[in-house]
Amino acid sequence: MDLANEVRGLLKIFGIRLPMTVKYGGFDGIVRPLIEMGKVLTHALVPLLEAREFL
């Protein structure tokens, strides 16, 4: 949960807001297409998404 909130916070800095509720298992599918828009976002968030998936 903490990693998901961290991802949401970082996206918010870049002006990207996620829906308040995301279907179970759908978080990754929503975030990855959004972060492909920029290199900075990709480098910052992919490790967090991978760690979240591992945990």
Image (cartoon, rainbow, N blue to C red):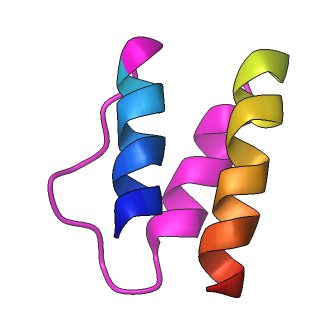
Residue sitting at x 50%, y 57%: 30
User: Eyeballing the image, is 9 above or below 50?
Assistant: above
25 or 50: nearer the viewer: 50
Return the x and y of residue 20 as percentages of the image width and height. Answer: 15, 53
| Quarter location, residue 44 | top right
Return the x and y of residue 39 as percentages of the image width and height. Answer: 84, 20
User: Eyeballing the image, is 13 above or below 47?
Assistant: above
Dominant SS type (magenta): loop
Return the x and y of residue 42 as percentages of the image width and height. Answer: 78, 34
Locate residue 25 relative to residue 48 in the image: left or right: left
Return the x and y of residue 14 as percentages of the image width and height. Answer: 47, 13
Residue sitting at x 77%, y 18%: 40
Label count reads 0
Residue sitting at x 48%, y 44%: 7
Locate residue 37 relative to residue 27 in the image: left or right: right
Locate residue 50 relative to residue 21 in the image: left or right: right
The quadrant in which the C terminus is found is: bottom right
Q: Which residues are magenta?
A: 13-37
Q: Do we see residue 21 in this rendering?
A: yes
| Quarter location, residue 21 | bottom left
User: Eyeballing the image, is 51 above or below 25?
Assistant: above
User: Eyeballing the image, is 40 above or below 53?
Assistant: above
3 or 37: nearer the viewer: 3
Residue sitting at x 55%, y 50%: 31
| Quarter location, residue 36 | top right
Q: Do we see residue 15 in this rendering?
A: no
- Residue 15 painted magenta: yes
Q: Residue furthest left?
A: 20
27 or 10: nearer the viewer: 10
The quadrant in which the N terminus is found is: bottom left
- Residue 18 painted magenta: yes
